[in-house]
Image (spheres, rainbow, N blue to C red):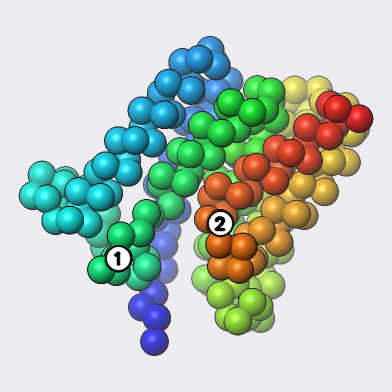
Amino acid sequence: MTKEISYGQEIFRKTIHLSSLWMVVSIAFFPKWFNIALFAFLLVSTILVEYGNHRKWRLFTLTYGSLFNRILREKETQEKFHLSGAPYVIAAALMVTIIFPKIIAMTALSVMLIGDTGAALVGRKLGKHKINLGTKSIEGSIAFWLFSTVVLLFFHFIYHQPPSFLLFGFAGITGATFAEIYENRIRLDDNFSIPLVVGLFLCLSVWL
């Protein structure tokens, strides 16, 4: 049977996940070149720290390991090295910063951070109807879509985006919902795939 972290540990994990919203703030207020350099540095550093913890290098097990080992998922603690969600979040921040205009990058990253948090917490607490071989729930997927919709509406009204922003945004978060559901089948971490899917759809509101 697959080991599952407790709901309290899930809350702690998602609190850390939500704290990554600082990257959205950074995209909003700092130059593109600065954010690219910052996110690239953090990505390399995080991968190095996680690898050091996996190899049980003392410095990393005393710091990263003592803080986060208890909230790692089973695949992240196996003998074979697996990255946690953190490097994928940072990689997503780096990619959306490079590829997309500022507002789209901010929206796409926020959808992933807030929508995924809602999906995980609602799915764990209320998820009774399992889908995709029991890895996800209908309730969690609905929560993802609803939380993502709130994010989309926020950026639409705060930044006075055109109606096409909403139209393609809704299409994007619907596509991202399926990317989140079938994460294990597409073999791409949803922390990385969701912002790219949403960002690409939102770009259609600019290109078309």
First along the sequence among labels 1 and 2? 1
112 horizontally vs 89: left or right: right
- Examine the rendering and report whether any part of residue 151 can be seen: no
The kind of secondary structure element at disc 1 is loop
Within 10 Å of disc 1 (Cα), the crowding (few <14, some 14-19, many 20+) is: few
Residue 75 to residue 94: above or below: below
Residue 188's disc is: 2
Q: Where is residue 149 in the image (x, y as percent from the top left)?
A: 74, 47
Q: Quadrant of the C terminus?
A: top right
Front residue (pair 71, 181): 181
Front residue (pair 48, 21): 48
Q: In which quarter of the image is the N terminus?
A: bottom left
Front residue (pair 150, 54): 54
Residue 76 to residue 166: above or below: below
91 horizontally vs 116: left or right: left
In which image quadrant can residue 156 be found? top right
In which image quadrant can residue 65 be found? bottom left
The kind of secondary structure element at disc 2 is loop
For the point 81% across and 22% down, the residue is 160
Three-letter code, disc 2: Leu
Q: Position of residue 40 (x, y in %)?
A: 41, 29
Q: Give the CA separation, mark 1 to mark 2.
A: 17 Å
The residue wearing badge 1 is 80
* Residue reaching furthest to the bottom: 1
- Examine the rendering and report whether any part of residue 132 can be seen: yes
68 horizontally vs 145: left or right: left
For the point 50% across and 15% down, the residue is 33
Three-letter code, disc 1: Lys
For the point 32% across and 43% down, the residue is 47
Residue 159 to residue 154: above or below: above
